[in-house]
Amino acid sequence: MKEEFQAPQGKILKVSGKCLSLVGDDIDTDRINPARFLKCVDFESLGEAVFEDDRKDLNGKHPFDLKLNQNASILLVNSNFGCGSSREHAPQSLMRWGIRAIIGESFAEIFYSNCIAIGIPCFTMAKKDIASLQDKAAIGNLFFEIDIKNSIAIEESRRHKLEIKESSKNMFLSGEWDATSTLLSNIKLIERKMNILPYIHLNK
Amino acid sequence: MSQNTLYDKVWDLHKVADLPGGSSQIFIGLHLIHEVTSPQAFGALKDKNLKVKFPSRTIATVDHIVPTDNQSRPFKDNLAEQMIDTLEKNCKNHKIKFFNIGSGSQGIVHVVAPELGLTQPGMTIACGDSHTSTHGAFGSIAFGIGTSQVRDVLASQTLAMNKLKVRKIWCDNKLSEGVFAKDLVLHIINKLGVKAGVGYAYEFSGPAIDFLSMEERMTICNMSIEGGARCGYVNPDEVTFNYIKDRQFSPKSDNWVQAVKWWKSLSSEKDAIYDDAISIDASKVEPTVTWGITPGQSIGVSQKIPELSELSVDDQFIAGEAYEYMGLNPGQAIKNTPIDVCFIGSCTNGRISDLRVAAEIVQNHKVSPNVKAFVVPGSEKVAKAAIEEGLDKIFKEAGFQWREPGCSMCLAMNPDKLTGNQVSASSSNRNFKGRQGSPSGRTLLMSPAMVAAAAIEGKVSDVREFIKK
């Protein structure tokens, strides 16, 4: 039975769980979440829509449908993952399916910032290291405990070094990935900035 | 680290504060919203009990979900109706200016803001849409954001961001006849790859760029994101100023003089430092067509689809996927590939100059009997101008359908979709699997002129032969 959905909240110090391998470069956000699923005014039902067309195409053999991968929470991907559209629906649907962290060769820029903004840390690793972890996750259970502060994934007795942008790491450790209140704490500075920008006055 | 580029100047001007974690708080001068990525952001504001901080800095229109045949309300599609209705209510409740259908100014957000004079040099511009990079054509720093960031801009008019590196893309010489901005940008993405731009802003400069109109520059910057670059820009010049002058929201009288003076000071300095620089010979670019499932998988129209062995190791996996999905073989010529659907429109190529070029090709020709061809103007203003010039008649007489403005089959959130494994020749920006509404539909990206030629011939054709005819 699926556990009730709980979005990440507050400080995120570690992510633990089973790894799911999804092989492929340049996997775009249209594939993660085809455009017809953007016809909604909330994100609630997106978990089931993740990779809908790819999954139909593979008829039960897509990594998100394999029995082995059920309840996985750490996604292993290759390069330029999440390229294309800025739709936050894509990381939202991954999150609602159960993904809580992503490790990959590289991430598309907007997808990466969307993940940060909803509390999903994205880590990078060298191509060959990812490939060997993907091989392992594809044939059996691979469990990680990711320690965000030290940027390491702990697999029983083995430790894998992960890379993450310092500013992103700090946001997870402090809970400020949910940026609104941090931004609003500088409200006086924001108002001052608004008053000195040339175009604000020139367009009056 | 880059120095003295336009990007550096605009970034510094808009920096509000250094944030504790190491990122920067950046003021957003112009925020554009539409019906797809804003409802959840307004919902989050409500949940957090927050207001829109500066409603005058946000502008709304509706584009992604609008039908292009019958736009009467309520829309036939209940979900689409719910989305436009939600946007109308949110704009009304938060006092945000909304260019709705029938206002005379509705259209694709990246067509509308420039033509209204809202997009100006030196601004930071954000929108919940990856093609926001379009606005960089004016010398602004413009980028796509997700819904949580839309929420942050609504609430604070700022974003937490990391500064990008800057890559100068110098485009030497001039495009030859029958070769357009779309061909140039597809060529650049092919040369650099779809991920080379991650972590970078792209500065497009050089004689070939100086020579382009504003609308062509928008086509180039629009597709920066397809090369992985979240924003791309062109230094503003007289072409820029002439385009903006006398538009609805442009500065007027004394303010205009002041504005131009300020805009001139924004360009990258001669001694600017870039993190990277590359050079492209624009005169060597052919009309370009994509053959695969990423915008980087393109070739000149006279070339053959590359063999795996001709590609770098990094490009081979996705190439293998592309051959299979597209049903095209390595070594096969792209020319003469049969086409089922032709689409002229989108934020990349749905502007008046795009329609003019395409109309010139189709005039006195007929659309091939096997092809469904349609034109979707980028905005109500584009549609009006086209009708005044008689372009709609030229298209209709040739057998094209003439539609109402919207994003349409660029992403197929409205009823305009491919069916089955149809092949489309499209002036849009993405050829991803399933992008145009059918999970097995296939897209060949090309310039509007090339789409027009494909519509007449029913197959991929070299538009240069058409120009000679």
Image (spheres, coloured by chain):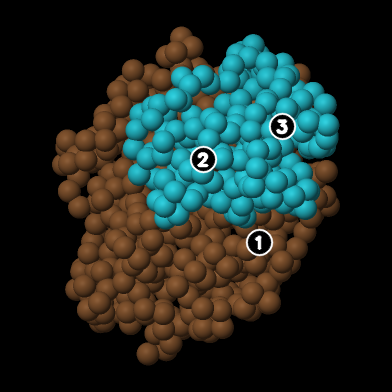
Query: In which quadrant will I find the C terminus of chain B?
Result: bottom left
Colour-to-chain, cyan: A
Query: In which quadrant will I find the N terminus of chain B?
Result: top right
Kindly indicate the quadrant of the structure image that contains residue A111. Answer: top right
Element carrying mark 2: helix
The percent coordinates of residue B224 (x first, y second) are 59, 54
Say left or right for B349 vs B203.
left
Residue holding disc 3 = A144
Please name the amino acid that badge 1 sits on: Gly
Residue holding disc 1 = B193
Residue holding disc 2 = A67
Tell me if mark 2 has few (under 14), some (14-19) or many (20+) residues whose alpha carbon lies within 10 angstroms of its own: few
The percent coordinates of residue B341 (x first, y second) are 31, 68
Say left or right for B400 vs A99.
left
Colour-to-chain, brown: B
Image point (35%, 23%), residue name = B90
Image point (26%, 69%), residue name = B372
Q: Earlier in the sequence, mark 3 or mark 2?
A: 2
